[in-house]
Amino acid sequence: MLQMKLCGDPILRTQCTPVEKIDDGLLHTLDTMVEMMREQSGVGLAAPQVGITQRFLVMMTPDDEKIFKMINPRILSHSEKTVVMEEGCLSVLGGDNLPVYANVTRPESVVVEWTDENGKQLSAEMSGVPARIVQHETDHLDGKLFIDYLSGARREMVMRKVRRHKK
């Protein structure tokens, strides 16, 4: 059974390894991650968040609820234009057991390539919220959290809320 890993767990800071083959175990894990993401009202979930150090993630576009199951995703390019948007994370919870949010600056659009659950190579240009989600989730695969983009003072404010969760 998969279990959410929370801020402070060293697995969230691990550089994930590529998936070598798509098998029934991986397909089952992807399906379970989609269920977990939906149950927690999230829009993305990366393998390290459930304790797996391989390069895969699931995400959902909020407008049409389209599900992406991305294996070995890579961001190939990003726009020079950036936007500031509020981000939260299912692994960064506050005292109320809900995600803590903060404004993060990221590229407005990205081109991403990945292998889908059927072994097909895909690529897409994503902008707006979907671009934000795929950047956030691929960061997880590199051991990076959204709080790493915050100033020291803002990160400390977020971490104070996280520490209240752990008590």
Image: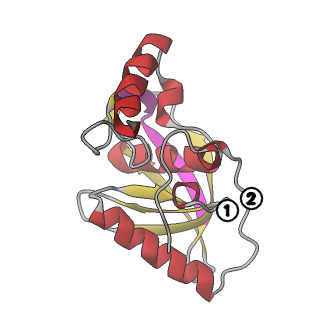
Q: Nearer the N terminus, badge 2 or badge 1?
A: 2
Q: Residues within 10 Å of mark 1 (few under 14, many from 20)?
A: some
Image height check: is 94 above or below 105? below
Q: Main secondary structure of the magenta part?
A: strand
Residue 112 within the magenta-colored segment of the rendering:
yes
Label 1: element kind: loop
Q: Is residue 108 left or right of residue 78?
A: left
**Crowd tier of the residue under label 2, counting other residues whose Cα lies within 10 Å: few below 14, some 14–19, many 20 or above:** some
Give whichever of 50, 149 is nearer the camera: 50
Q: Is residue 121 left or right of residue 126?
A: right
Residue located 32% across and 35% down the image: 100
Q: Choose between 70 and 107: the one closer to the eye.
A: 70
Q: Is residue 143 left or right of residue 161?
A: right
Is residue 69 shown to the viewer in this render?
yes
When the figure is inspected, residue 144 is found, relative to residue 47, above or below; the finding is above
Q: Is residue 126 magenta?
A: no
For the residues marked 2 and 1, what is the alpha-carbon distance in whole angstroms? 5 Å
Q: State yes or no: discs 2 and 1 in contact (Cβ < 8 Å).
A: yes
From the top left corner, tell me how far across and down residue 35 is, in percent.
Answer: 36, 72
Which residue is pictured at 32% across the width and 59% down the height?
A: 61
Q: In the rendered view of the protein, which quadrant contains the C terminus?
A: top left
Amino acid type at circle 1 is: Gln
Residue lying at 42% horizontally and 36% vertically, measured from the top left: 108
Query: Which segment is the magenta one?
Result: 103-114
Residue 12 location (% of width, % of height)? 59, 46
The color scheme shown is secondary structure
Q: Which residue is mark 2?
A: 17
Which residue is identified by label 1? 54
Q: Secondary structure at mark 2?
A: loop
